[in-house]
Each structure stands twice: as structure tokens, then as C-alpha cells.
Amino acid sequence: MKGGAMVAGLGNDVSTGHLRLLVRVARMYHEEGIRQPAIAAELNISQPRVSRLLREAVRRGIVRTVVVLPQSVHSELEDRLRRRYDLRDVVVVDTQESARNVIPALAAAAADYFDATFAGGDVIGISSWSETLLATVDRMQPKTSQVAECVIQLVGGVGSPEAQVRATRLLGRLAEIARARPVSVPSPGVVGDPSIRDALLQDSSVRDVVGRWRDLTVVLAGIGSLEPSPLLLSSGNAVGDADQDELRRLGAVGDVCLHFFDAAGRAVDSGFDRRVVGIDAATFRAVERRVGVAGGLRKLSAIRAAIEGGWVNILITDLQVAQRLDIPPNPQPAP
């Protein structure tokens, strides 16, 4: 038969001559690094035919592409978490430091992620009372062109002078990096009575910020556990003992922007929630990209609840937490 015998096992029958040509072209290109024009000249065939032969070699399984993951990249785990929790994106980072201090590694990974994803025209919301976000913004590089219109505080900020300096630095630094205008909330984050909160929300300066929250395109938030962080404790906006007792009775395990939720991610209706001056839960959850940056095993329950409840749809966390999120929690025994 012209062209040689026929060879089965590669889909349709392929002549041995054509098979040899496929292998020859594939090896020249992939193993020897010869460019397509040089292959065409050496084999006396056209360059378009070389391209077609290379595509055919892949289609027939003669050439198989294998992606080898670097040790610090966990894309398969990220893919599983993305599918399991219906997330837009997941970033898993190794923690080279002590597992008790994941903030440096998380901050570095989050800074890289934000540098790559702030493309232009964003209206960014940021929670002020997050040590991880403070460290993240410190690691970000200033942009050469404007990538955001404004950066808006999501929770009131007036607290102790030292904590307020840090919150102001966080907001101002991110606005400087993004070449955007900073917008703060001119109010305490937590007040003593719901009526005070309601009155503050009617103040013209606060009402202007509330209106801007509806324009947010991305929010950056920490995920808190029921036990307040040292930064929140020092801010004057921390959850008091009586409020913590109430939240525990209601099953709260964590919070985003001081909105507490239970282990299933359901919002907890508490007296504390009605005293928070900040973005409301419905407006927060309506933002298209909601990035949660958190890690450490003490926050595992809070992180799981935050993604199961849809509080965040982009997660940046550490490897230990990610591995446990990949394992379904133990089912509760039947009563």
C-alpha cells in the first residue's frame, strides 16, 4: 500500500509513514528545540503543515503535556476548594514561619494577588481592623497608573489614638498605591445603643459614605473569630464580654466586618450587630468580588463558615487551613 502499512491504536488507522513524520516533527520541535521554519526547511514541507502535524501529534497522544507544580504551588488543592465551595478564586500559601504566625506569608501572597488583579476603575472597600490586611498593604507596590477611583472604609474607625493611626495608615496607604481617593467613615465603629447608630447613619457625612458602598466593585476583608484580635481590642471597637456571651449563645463562630455568623455561615441577629456603624450585610454580599484574607487553625471554623455562607467568594489562606477545608467536617450523629 502506498505510504506504508497501516498502524492501529491511535484513533483512526495511521500509515507508518505518516506516523514516522509525526514523531519526527514532534521530537525536532519538543526535544531538540528546533523552530517550525527550520523544521519545514529540513523536511522540505511547508510551515503550515508543520503546525498541523504538531497539533495532530497532541491530538493523537504522541505528545502529552504534563504540568509539573513547583513545591510552593498548590493549584490542584485550590481547584478542589474552588469547586467545593463555589468560589471565584482561591490562593493557598505555604507558611515558612511558625504555624502560629501565618500573617507574613498571607500578606505576601495577598499583596501579589492584589497587584495582579487591580486592573483599573475599581471602587475598593477595606475593613480597617485587620492585622493581615495592614501587613498586606505594607507589602504592595505603588501602581504607575490609577487602578481605582477610590478606597472606602467599610467600618467606622474612631477608636484609641494608636489604633486610629494604624487604620488611617491602612486606608491612606492603599489609596496611595492605587492612586485613588481615600474615603473614611467619620464615626465610631461600634456605639453603645442602636438608636445612636441610627442617628449617626442619618448624619450627612456618614450618609454620603453609605451611598458610596453601593458602588463597590471589590472588598478586602479579614475573617475574624469570636475572640477579638489584638488590633481590634486596642481599637475601642472590640466585642465586650457581654456581647461575646450573647454571640456564643446564638452560635456565632466568626465575623466579616463585624457581622457575625454561625458555623453554617448564617448571619446572627444580635444586639451587637445593631450597634455597628458599617456596611450592612446585604450591601456587602452584593459586591461582585469579596476577598477574604485569613489563616491559622484557630480561625478554621470561622473561615469555613465565611465561605460556606458566601460572605467571601475569593479566599487567600494558608496550607494547613486549606487542607482541612478540603476534608468535609464530621457529620453530626442522628438524635
Image: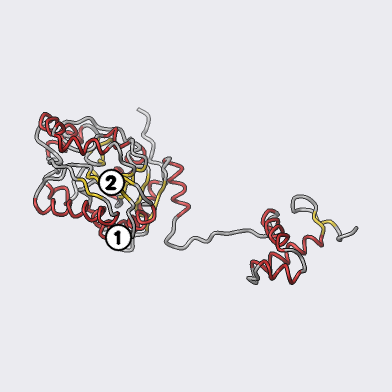
Q: Above or below — where is 119 with respect to 216? A: below
**Residue 179 lies in what quarter of the image?**
bottom left
Q: Furthest residue to the right?
A: 1
**Residue at horizontal 9 percent and vertical 49 percent from the top:** 160
Q: Circle 1 is placed at which residue position?
A: 142
What secondary structure is found at the residue carrying circle 2? strand
Q: Circle 2 is placed at which residue position?
A: 221
Q: Above or below — where is 269 with respect to 104? A: above
x and y, in percent, of residue 161 in the image: 9, 52
In the foreground, 135 or 83: 135
x and y, in percent, of residue 104 in the image: 28, 60
Q: Is residue 100 visible?
A: no
CA gap between label 2 and label 1 equals: 20 Å
| Sequence-wise first label, 2 or 1 | 1
In the foreground, 203 or 111: 203
The amino acid type of the residue labelled 2 equals: Ala
